Image (cartoon, rainbow, N blue to C red):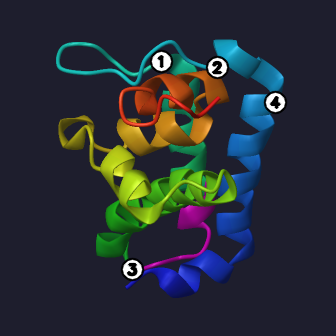
Amino acid sequence: MFDAYGRTVEFSIVLGIAAALREEFGADVDAHPGGPGTEAGQVNRAYQVVARIALKAIDPPRAYLPGLVSWALRQAARRRFIEARLPGAVIEALLDAEPGLGDAWPAYLALAPPSVIRDLLEPEHPDLG
């Protein structure tokens, strides 16, 4: 439904901001994605806000914006994992690992340093590193 948005400048901005935040903050980008009773880290939350503002500039129908933001954050994480050459099933398992966290989870995955991703994968793939 949102695939056409993946070719927009605004979506490229969402991807670029994630890369810039990872570069700027490194391993200290965010300690956690949040959870029940705990807000996501400030960088995670700021990234979600910036993604929402950037994608709103596309002027999607108002009812589509929350879904578009969720899609874009998942795509940002997915593309990162594809670049890391993770198998499709592993990518989907990571993306679906914390459904109760809403957009905070894919934002966290898009921002998390490689060491965090390795830690998430280690039980399944101890040879990654």
Residue 31 appears left or right of 28:
left
* Quarter occupied by residue 67: bottom left
* Residue 99 drawn at (x, y percent): 21, 43
Q: How crowded is mark 1: few (under 14 residues within 10 Å), some or many (20 or more)?
A: some
Q: What residue type is labelled 4?
A: Glu
Element on which disc 2 rests:
loop
* Residue 105 drawn at (x, y percent): 37, 37
Q: What residue type is labelled 1?
A: Gly
Element on which disc 1 rests:
loop
Q: Residue at x 44, y 33 (%)?
A: 121
- Towards the viewer: 50 or 29: 29
Give residue 23's mark: 4
Where does label 2 land, which residue? 29
Q: Which residue is drawn at 48% across and 30% down?
A: 45
Label 1 or label 2, whichever comes before in sequence order: 2
Residue numbers of the magenta segment: 54-60
Q: Distance of mark 4 from mark 2, alpha carbons?
A: 9 Å
Q: How crowded is mark 2: few (under 14 residues within 10 Å), some or many (20 or more)?
A: some
Q: Distance of mark 1 from mark 4, alpha carbons?
A: 17 Å
Q: Residue at x 53, y 50 (%)?
A: 77
Where does label 3 land, which residue? 61
